[in-house]
Image (spheres, helix red, strand yellow):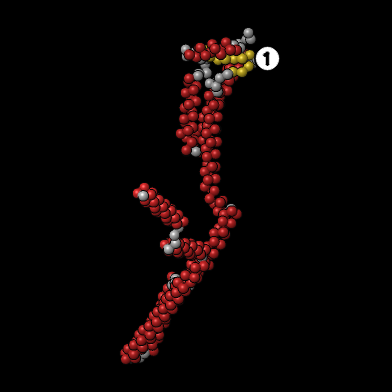
């Protein structure tokens, strides 16, 4: 068995290093908590878990097993059942070895847990930033530009297809143009009235100028209304002509369509079949069938046989009477 003194010195060095690193780790954890308020709770939880683990598996051990192997592991397991802390030490080639325990480094474990938590938070923030920037990237991508161009082309094509229809229908733009024209006419009439009022000297002149301005405004409004009504009538006439043309072309289109041709052929075949049936029925009303002729021949043969039998019987009776 090797001497335990070197092992105990190494253990004391580990404990001293852990005690020296504990304040630095606590300060780093506090700085992380101050820098990231969201991670304060998780850091505190990690520190509490490390402290609980240190309490459950204290640094001061009751039993030290050196080079026990499998038997040492079994003994340590049994002792742990009774609440005895066990330190397992494997002897190496030189003075020294490996210590299998995590309780000797509570500060290092807490620092590692805090660092891992911080890395996870950074990864989550990066993922959230990527998710936030993804729609903008998609909008700026070449594929999005191509899709927008295709949508614009389809919209233009649709507009071209329906342009013929909207030639005969009043749009909002035309109505707005008409309203703007009426407003301009009213403004011109008001300006003319104001100019006439400025040039008038007496009330009579002002009255006459206002009357002329009102008459001019009424004439302009009537002209605009008449023009609008005429445009509406023209549009209605064009719509009626188009509807009549469609009604006139519809039967021809229906006659020229494949479905109409098939329906006409089916109707013609049905009519021909009905006509043939009628002709056949009329023909067989006046023509004897082979079955009827045979029946008549059989009946005639039976009648002839009966007549011959009756004649023969009469001859026999006459001979007997003689």
Query: Foreground residue, 258 or 242?
Result: 258
Quadrant placement of the N terminus? top right
Residue 246 screen position, x and y as percent: 47, 71
- What residue is at 56 percent from the left and 62 percent from the top? 153
Question: Furthest residue to the front?
Answer: 322
Residue 312 screen position, x and y as percent: 40, 50
Residue 142 screen position, x and y as percent: 60, 54
Q: Is residue 31 above or below residue 103?
A: below
Q: Secondary structure at mark 1?
A: loop
Query: Foreground residue, 116 or 173?
Result: 173
Q: For residue 287, what is the image quadrant?
A: bottom left
Residue 217 in view, yes or no: no
Mark 1 surroundings within 10 Å by alpha-carbon count, few (fewer than 14), some (14 through 19), many (20 or more): few
Residue 197 screen position, x and y as percent: 37, 87
**Residue marked by disc 1:** 93
Give left or right: position of 297 versus 20: left
Question: Furthest residue to the top?
Answer: 1
- What residue is at 38 percent from the left and 49 percent from the top? 319
């Amino acid at each position: 068995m090797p001497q335990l003194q070197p092992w105990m010195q190494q253990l004391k060095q580990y404990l001293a290093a852990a005690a020296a690193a504990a304040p630095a780790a606590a300060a780093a954890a506090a700085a992380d908590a101050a820098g990231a308020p969201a991670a304060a709770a998780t850091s505190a939880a990690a520190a509490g878990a490390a402290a609980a683990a240190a309490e459950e598996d204290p640094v001061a051990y009751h039993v030290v097993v050196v080079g026990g192997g499998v038997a040492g592991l079994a003994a340590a397991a049994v002792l742990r059942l009774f609440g005895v802390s066990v330190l397992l030490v494997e002897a190496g080639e030189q003075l020294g070895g490996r210590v299998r325990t995590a309780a000797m480094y509570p500060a290092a474990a807490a620092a590692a847990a805090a660092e891992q938590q911080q890395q996870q938070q950074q990864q989550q923030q990066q993922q959230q930033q990527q998710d936030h920037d993804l729609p903008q990237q998609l909008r700026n991508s070449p594929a999005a530009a191509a899709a927008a161009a295709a949508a614009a082309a389809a919209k233009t094509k649709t507009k071209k297809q329906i342009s013929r229809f909207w030639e005969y229908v009043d749009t909002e733009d035309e109505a707005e143009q008409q309203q703007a024209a009426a407003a301009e006419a009213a403004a011109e009439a008001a300006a003319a009235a104001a100019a006439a009022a400025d040039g008038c000297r007496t009330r009579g002149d002002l009255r006459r100028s206002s009357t002329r301005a009102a008459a001019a405004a009424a004439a302009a409004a009537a002209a605009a209304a008449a023009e609008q009504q005429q445009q509406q009538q023209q549009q209605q006439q064009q719509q009626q002509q188009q509807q009549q043309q469609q009604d006139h072309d519809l039967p021809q289109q229906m006659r020229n369509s494949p479905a109409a041709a098939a329906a006409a052929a089916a109707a013609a075949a049905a009519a021909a079949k009905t006509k043939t049936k009628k002709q056949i029925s009329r023909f067989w009303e006046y023509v004897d069938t082979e079955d009827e002729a045979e029946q008549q021949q059989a009946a005639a043969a039976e009648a002839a046989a009966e007549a011959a039998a009756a004649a023969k019987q009469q001859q026999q009776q006459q001979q007997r009477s003689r």
